Image (spheres, rainbow, N blue to C red):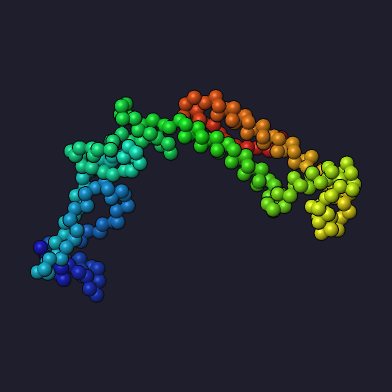
């Protein structure tokens, strides 16, 4: 052993420090920080300074450990190779899915079909909404989009009877400085342009739902590509 104070480098150059350590048969080793999973190796004893001032260094002693997974939470931990797998754990790796379930009788993982099916159905629905919202909100704020139904209803009522009560269109007409008849026609034209686009997305959503209804395995559900496009 070499005194800790002797191993330390003070104001001397690195070359002088190396030569001094070499004189007592000591070669410092540069160890890069460990960036792997610390659970996979036994780190050995920590570097310790003994009460008598001597430095005791024990280097890491790599011992590969075995991963095990909790059968309910899939929480991973490691055990030494000759240890028994703890109760409630398995050494069978779960599948790469958010919905695995453990079958005690079969001793294997499977995919919870009901949950993955429901998740895909939500994805089909939500992606359609996001797709249309993105198109609408490129030009219009959400609070204005929310008035479209009222605008169209009032515009159709006005076309049928110019004496119809149209509070939404009255406000827009006054704020825009546009006569109501012109505004009514603009609203109807916009609604007619939007309806086919929205209907096209509805058709795509229903097609995806048909594919989902026909799926009988988790792999078929995962393979459904939920992507919406504009009409050509």
On the image, the x and y values in percent for residue 138 come to: 69, 50
Is 145 displayed left or right of 130 in the figure?
A: right
Task: Examine the image and state in which quarter residue 52 appears.
Answer: bottom left
Figure check: 73 above or below 31: above
Q: Pick the quarter of the image with the C terminus.
A: top right
The picture quadrant where one finds residue 74 is: top left
Q: Can residue 220 be seen from the camera position used here?
A: yes
Q: Nearer the viewer, residue 40 or 106?
A: 106
- Can you see residue 26? no
* Vertical placement of residue 44 versus 221, above or below: below
- Asked whether 168 or 204 is in front, the reply is 168
Residue in the picture at 79% in, 39% down: 192
At x 81%, y 46%, the residue is 154
- Residue 144, position as x, y percentages in the image: 72, 52
Quadrant into which the N terminus falls: bottom left
Residue 212 place in picture, x, y as percent: 55, 29
- Indicate left or right for 179 with 94 as reference: right
Write down the quadrant of residue 76 in the picture: top left
Q: Residue at x 84, y 43 (%)?
A: 157
Question: Is residue 148 or residue 201 the one in the foreground?
Answer: 148
* Residue 93 in the image, given as x and y percentages of width and height: 33, 36
Tally the marks. 0
Q: Residue at x 59, y 41 (%)?
A: 126
13 to 197, vertically: above or below:
below
> Would residue 19 appear left or right of 94 to someone viewing this image?
left
């Amino acid at each position: 052993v070499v005194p800790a104070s002797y191993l330390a480098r003070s104001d001397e150059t690195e070359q002088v420090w190396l030569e001094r350590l070499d004189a007592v048969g000591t070669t410092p080793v540069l160890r890069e920080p460990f960036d792997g999973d610390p659970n996979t190796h036994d780190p050995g004893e920590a570097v310790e300074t003994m009460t008598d001032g001597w430095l005791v260094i024990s280097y890491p002693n790599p011992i590969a450990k075995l991963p095990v997974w909790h059968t309910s939470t899939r929480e991973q931990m490691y055990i030494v190779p000759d240890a028994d797998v703890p109760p409630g754990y398995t050494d069978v790796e779960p599948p790469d899915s958010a919905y695995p379930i453990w079958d005690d009788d079969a001793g294997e993982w499977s995919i919870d079909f009901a949950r993955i099916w429901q998740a895909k159905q939500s994805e089909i629905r939500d992606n359609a909404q996001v797709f249309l919202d993105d198109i609408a909100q490129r030009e219009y704020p959400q609070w204005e989009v929310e008035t479209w139904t009222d605008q169209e209803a009032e515009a159709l009522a006005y076309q049928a009877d110019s004496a119809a009560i149209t509070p939404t269109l009255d406000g827009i007409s006054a704020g825009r400085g546009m006569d109501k008849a012109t505004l009514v026609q603009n609203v109807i034209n916009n609604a007619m342009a939007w309806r086919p686009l929205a209907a096209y997305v509805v058709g795509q959503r229903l097609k995806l739902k048909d594919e989902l209804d026909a799926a009988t395995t988790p792999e078929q559900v995962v393979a459904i590509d939920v992507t919406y496009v504009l009409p050509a």
